[in-house]
Amino acid sequence: MLLCCCLQMAVTWAFCLASWMRTLDTGLRVHQDNLISGSTKTFFPHKEGSPVRQRKPFFERLRRLEEQFQRFQEVTLTHLQDIANNYNVSYNVDVQFQRLTEESRAVALAVNRSQAAVQVDLAHLKTWMRQTKRRGRKVDAKLQALDHALSVKSRQQAWEGKDQIAQQDAVSHLALDVLTLQNTLAHLAHQVRNQSTRLAALEWQLQVANPDTAAQGLILAPNQPVQPGLSSPKLHREKQAFRPPLKHRNPSQDLAATLQGTQKPSSLNSHWASAAAPKDSPHLAWPPQGTGEICNTGPVFVFPNASTENVVFLSPGLLKGLRALSFCSWIRMTSGYLGTLLSYATEENDNKLVLHGRDSLVPGSMHFVIGDPAFRELPLQLLLDRQWHHICVSWTSIQGRYWLYVDRKLVATGSHFREDYEIPPGGSLVLGQEQDSVGGSFDSAEAFVGSMSGLAIWDRVLLPREVANLFIGKELPIGVILTLANVTSVGGFVQRTECPCLEHCP
């Protein structure tokens, strides 16, 4: 603004100067004309005697003054043109400055927007990196556990191979010993037969030497019992007759059968074994449910696909720490792999208690996780036939024992799994998804696809007869802390249905 005011003042001053110069030029021209026409007396009355000499210096000065005026006029015009050009340049500079100001504002807005977008992308990248690190730790822990299991299994196989070799050597040595004993027994039998022949010959000689005494000592009444004596060949033959024949007694075969566990018990042992066997065995005493139907299990939750939105929330979660638990439910799988049945996450660890599988694991394999990264792999291939099955998983911190039942049959057990460990309370408990953060970060590869019913959780280990009672539809054992009645939210495409019997559910 100050520059514009200065330019305006300079232009005004230049126009005033030009007007004054034009007025002076006009006056000089009029004065020159008057001088030429002889009117110089008016201006110079005291030099009337020499008008020519007086006009000549005046014209020269007038000419010089005119030349100076023309130069001054040219310089003035040049300065005015420069001022006008500078004014135009300054105006263009203002316009360009305003344009640059607007462009800088637009650039600043674009930079702010790009910074916000970059910050959002960085936040997503950080979250993805944390999840990737967490999953990497899980994979590393699982690989370490698998490596440890493989090493233990290889050592066990090596020990079993050594034991088998030692057993084979022992069997071969025993077979040699048996053969030696057989030869010894055959030799003894031959000697016994020779001794019998000699005794018979001696008795015959005795009868020939003293027939009366021999007759009295050897001939007995028909009803009189025979008294045993060393000189009685009849008694010796009877004893030999009561012994089992040697051809029916093969010690080597009996020993091999005993070592291999293939020899059948005798009739007497079988009799006592049948008498000692319980008459109310758990596998036979439970009556079947009608014609194989599974009824009165409560609501059925159907997970139709592997969407990350298909989830069921249970509340409240665990109200107290658990040092033992049992999880039982009716399950029907409709996919080719086992998804996540149960996931319990806390702020400290998102895998405090998980029963999950994924499409990249071995079909029918499920990981039982307590306090990640510790886990055990459970064999559940039976669940892949798209039929209803009843499963129960129990664990106790005492010696880290755990049990897996499928259709009331014990299919897996172990120990030293999270000994003296306590599952803390206050976490998030969901069904059908595996939590990578509390209440979220689900993965479709670990989603459960199928149906579940009759789910319940206990704060203790169930006994085998209690598991069998659940399978045949009896009432829930005591100590239950959570059931499907604690469902508070159902997400995605999960459907809740009521079916009198599970076989009639869609």
Image: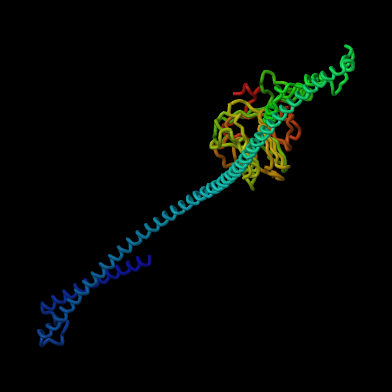
> Seen from this angle, which residue lies furthest front?
209
What quarter of the picture does the N terminus occupy? bottom left
- Where residue 148 appears, as percent x and y from the top left, is 60, 44
- Which corner quadrant of the image does residue 326 belong to? top right
- Where residue 293 appears, as percent x and y from the top left, is 66, 21
What colour scheme has been applied to the protein in the rendered image?
rainbow
The residue that appears at 28% across and 65% down in the rendered structure is 85
Nearest the camera: 81 or 180?
180
Numbered marks: total: 0
In this picture, residue 59 sits left or right of residue 140: left
Nearest the camera: 473 or 226?
226
The residue that appears at 85% across and 18% down in the rendered structure is 209
| Residue 322 visible to an observer of this rendering | no
Quick check: 183 above or below 106? above
Nearest the camera: 154 or 68?
154
What quarter of the picture does the C terminus occupy? top right
- Which corner quadrant of the image does residue 262 belong to? top right
- Where residue 435 appears, as percent x and y from the top left, is 60, 41
In this picture, residue 51 sits left or right of residue 115: left
The residue that appears at 57% across and 40% down in the rendered structure is 442
- Which corner quadrant of the image does residue 55 belong to? bottom left
Nearest the camera: 198 or 156?
198
- Where residue 14 appears, as percent x and y from the top left, is 27, 70
| Residue 128 visible to an observer of this rendering | yes
